[in-house]
Amino acid sequence: MLSSSDDCPFCRIGPERIAFSWSHGHAIWDGFPVSPGHLLLIPHRHAATWDDLTVEEKVALTVAIDQAMAVVRARHTPNGFNVGFNLGAAAGQTVFHFHLHVIPRYSGDVADPRGGVRTVIPSKGNYLALATPERTRLIAAPHDRALITGGEDAFIRHLLPHIDDSQSIDLVVSFILDSGVRLLQPRLQDLLDRGGRLRVVTGDYLDVTEPSALRRLLDLEGNVKHWVFEGMVLVGNDLVLLMTLAKGDLFSGNEYDDRFIDSQTFKWHTQSRTTQKSKHGRIIRGELTGYQMHLFVRPTKLRDSTAAPFIYCGKISSVEWHDEKPIAVTSRLETQIPKRLHRILKIGVLPTPPR
């Protein structure tokens, strides 16, 4: 039981956990979230319980509930909310600096949600009992056999409890599809909101057909409001190049020769409106420091009558450039393209002369 301001964790909140503030308090991301987006509304003043708050503080906290729900909705897609607080040890209060829970709820997060605040989510109600046999069984469930085969026993059912109870996650996968990233995004966003660390290591296949998988990975915090499927996309300090080798009628009337010179050199053209003095042009020329270019290439626009995915080739830097609208660029890859991809990416294959 924590009752004094000297040992109160809510009197020593780091700025990275604060979602928003108001005159009498602030909202923080819960360190032991019941669900993705779980917020706590906390008065600045160290008041132990609801009974110890002033009328002004109570009114301000009540008004802040609407803002809290709006913040959660902007980051996640909840289907409902549980809102409430614990008053006294008999009601389960363990930190005696008043805090009000705003808990987003998602369809299917429990088998039977009826009862609402009477039950909340039983398996996560007591974060102080992490070491109980029942808790251990729930978290260890994915490892009670060697293989998860899918079907009725979906792997995601085993994966999500680990994400919810982690502070550091390394995801190592052979390829990434947008459908998979979409399922994990709320949980991974919640990990980052509570100060956790995330690292994703993937192979050379990344489905960016829409290309929302790439947006979700490069911008997990949702700072990018618009994504346009085009040749160059600036996401933070990353300039992402999405190149199609055999363009067909993709750029009808243009005869751009975008191709690999060898396994580490790529020749390409910017969009027809790009000048060397534009921000993209200055990044390409290396004039703006702190930026990194990434090359994604696909052999053709379509594969089996659907949009073909791009293959991530790695980080690149420009070694030569001339002209503008478009800029003709020769870039060097940080590492060579593996030989098994030479045929797919037409490395070493002479380009077909334009008609």
Image (cartoon, rainbow, N blue to C red):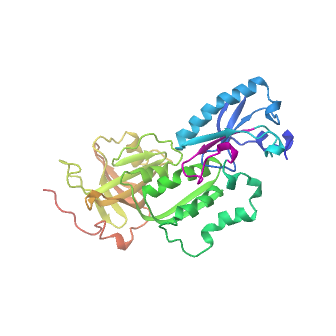
In front of the other: 243 or 26: 26
Locate residue 8 relative to residue 196 in the image: left or right. Answer: right
Above or below for 338 versus 171: below
Q: Is residue 107 magenta?
A: yes
The C terminus lies in quadrant = bottom left
Position in image of residue 57 (x %, y %): 75, 27
Going 43% across and 65% down the picture, which residue do you hit? 335
Q: Quadrant of residue 166?
A: bottom right
Going 76% across and 62% down the picture, which residue do you hit? 132
Locate residue 260 relative to residue 37 in the image: left or right. Answer: left
Locate residue 212 relative to residue 46 in the image: left or right. Answer: left
In front of the other: 36 or 315: 36
Going 49% across and 68% down the picture, which residue do you hit? 150
Hey, which residue is sitting farthest top in the picture?
56
Q: Is residue 65 magenta?
A: no
Q: Quadrant of residue 44?
A: top right
Position in image of residue 348 (x %, y %): 28, 69
Hey, which residue is sitting farthest left in the picture?
355
Q: Which residues are magenta?
A: 99-119
Position in image of residue 352 (x %, y %): 18, 62
Above or below for 193 versus 65: below
In front of the other: 237 or 155: 155
Position in image of residue 180 (x %, y %): 47, 58
- Count numbered badges in the picture: 0
Above or below for 1 versus 345: above
Locate residue 112 relative to residue 87 in the image: left or right. Answer: left
Going 28% across and 57% down the picture, which residue do you hit? 306
